[in-house]
Amino acid sequence: MSAIDEGRATRPARRRRGAAVTVAGAAATVAALLAGCSSGGDGGADAASSTAPATTSPKGGAAGLEGTAYRVPQSCGRLKAQPGGAIAGPALAACWGDALEAHGSVRAWTNGPPDMEAEVVLGASQRLRTQASDGRVVVVVDGASWSRSGDRWVAGVLNSQDEDEALGAATGEFAWATLSLEGMTRGVGECATWKVAADRAPVTLHDGASSSGLVRLDCMTPFEVMGATTTAASLWVRADWTPVRHASTLTLSGVAVESLVELTGHGTRFDIPVPA
């Protein structure tokens, strides 16, 4: 068993379950804060003119990639993507997470709410840089967040009376719960069995780009994740098991929510220093 495989096998399940609640709570907080923000606030209109997170990094210690080539993880090599075949959820989750780690970085997008795109660096220190729907840039390093306000970085503080602190913390918490390695892997291992679809129809991503030749896997039965019932779920991977898309329908307190995460730019170098 590789170091990555072993690390994946020993991750506490309680962290995955607890984060499911965080996703819903943080998303609601972000949406409420954004609704209350004026369009002319710091970090708003000018930053919003860009559709992707800013590539200019704040000062501080950096984290990035050195261009290491992707190698199919051992956990993926054991799986067979035969049309009509079945794959156990825990085995697929190990592969999904290990493949992301093997790439080292990814550009992730989720439909939220709110919609969010992030540059994500995976490794000993996980880092991501995202842009809220009002254009504010937020950096998250191992769970701690900072929000860009004018020409300065503001550390996120949950439930703060300061708008920048509160928005930075809520956005960072939602981004971390959704787009960290554990967040992007959640909902894969909880499904008992995935069936390999027979078709390889092209998939159109949210940005209009078309990706062909992807393997689609469909969850066979509903499953629970801390109070939410996933009634349908599908994954799309490349032939080398690179994760590309995760779509699911969840029911929470009687309300159905369509969740979508798309992953592109695998292995791209993102320089995300710690804000100072």
Image: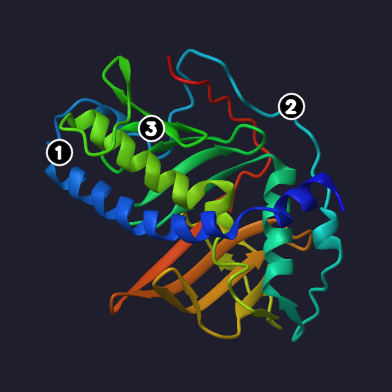
Mark 2: which amino acid?
A: Glu
Residue ID for mark 2: 66
The answer, for residue 213, to whether it is visible in the render is no
Residue 54 lies in quadrant: top left
Mark 3: which amino acid?
A: Val
Q: Earlier in the sequence, mark 1 or mark 3?
A: 1
Residue 169 versus residue 84 in the image, above or below: above
Rounded to the nearest angstrom, the CA distance separating label 1 from label 3 is 16 Å
Q: Earlier in the sequence, mark 2 or mark 3?
A: 2
Residue at horizontal 50 percent and vertical 58 percent from the top: 261
The answer, for residue 29, to whether it is visible in the render is yes
Residue 38 relative to residue 195: left or right? left
Kindly indicate whether the residue at mark 3 contacts the one at mark 1 (C-beta within 8 angstroms).
no
Residue 211 percent coordinates (x, y): 62, 61
Q: Nearer the viewer, residue 197 or 176?
A: 176
Residue 250 relative to residue 29: left or right? right
Q: Which mark is residue 37?
A: 1
